[in-house]
Amino acid sequence: MEERLVRTRRVGGSMACGDRRPQGSGAGVRLGLLGGFALSAGGGPVTVSAGAERLLAFVALCCNGNVPRGLVAGTLWPDVTERCALASLRSALSRLPAAGRAALEIGPAELRLADGVVVDLRDARSLARRILAPGAAPGRDAFGLAAVEDLSADLLPGWYEDWALLEADNWRRLRVHALEALARAFVGADRFPEAVAAAGAAVRADPLRESSQACLIRAHLAEGNPGDALQDVARYERRLRTELGLPAPSHLWSLVARAR
């Protein structure tokens, strides 16, 4: 997020002193950012406008906690004047439904997520880091298909603002590394269906990534399915030739050839 934020026009927050910090906490409020935006409260979905979605998502993605109002306004309304951007922010805050306001701590100069708000991306990031931690044993019972599913969703698909795309790329890289680590560990633990699932999720996240393709091929071979491995190499080569004009690396073909 920092690369995008340093380029964002700085907008003063002094005009925003009319809003008051709400009482209470965000307990029972959940923000979903993986696979698409979702807001729920008390276990039920809450519908908000597209502008409110972006406001809540941006604050949730700012990992430093307190987010200056000027930063929020300048990022979400970059093509208008400072006065108009801050007015748009105040208007967006006033139109938030109760669950949306409960998700935020609203101060005169800053915004932050309220204590107790659950964000699925934070949980998924924590999972990925546990898998990648030195000494982790992801091939054992601590992780399974549920972990693969938690790491399989894109961040805010269909959102094309620079700040959203940057965070989506960061999440994709982290989860691909974690999925590859899971696939290798599952193969080592003879948990071949989970290995194929983890490697397949990594390939779907980044179809041109060679290491993910290698994980998937090795998982198929370890399971005793050289035909599936051969199909994967052929499919990978077709994609590489179509998009980059390159053949598949020879060592991937060698893996299949040795198995046959």
Image (tube, helix red, strand yellow):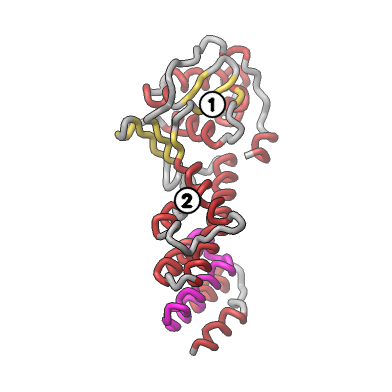
Q: Is residue 57 left or right of residue 14?
A: left
Nearest the camera: 17 or 149? Answer: 149
Residue 108 coordinates in the image, percent (x, y): 57, 14
Q: Is 210 placed above or below 54 here?
A: below
Classify mark 1: helix, strand or loop.
strand
Residue 224 x/y as whole percent: 42, 82
Task: Give the magenta-colored segment's residue range.
Answer: 204-233
The crowding category of the residue bearing disc 1, from other C-alpha atoms within 10 Å (few below 14, some 14 to 19, many at least 20), is many
| Image spot of residue 50 (x, y percent) | 43, 33
- Residue 82 drawn at (x, y percent): 62, 20
Q: Which residue is mark 2?
A: 154
Residue drawn where x is 52% and y is 34% of the image: 60
Q: Is residue 226 magenta?
A: yes
Q: Measure the C-alpha gap from mark 1 to mark 2.
A: 24 Å
Residue 191 vertical position relative to residue 155 in the rendered view, above or below? below
Up-down relation of residue 117 to residue 144 (above or below): above
Front residue of 81 and 103: 103
The amino acid at mark 2 is Asp
Q: Which residue is mark 1?
A: 112
**Residue in view at x 47 percent, y 74 percent:** 219
Q: Is residue 46 on the magenta stretch?
A: no
Report the amino acid beneath label 1. Arg
Disc 2 crowd rating (10 Å Cα; few below 14, some 14-19, many 20+) is some
Q: What kind of element bears circle 2?
A: loop
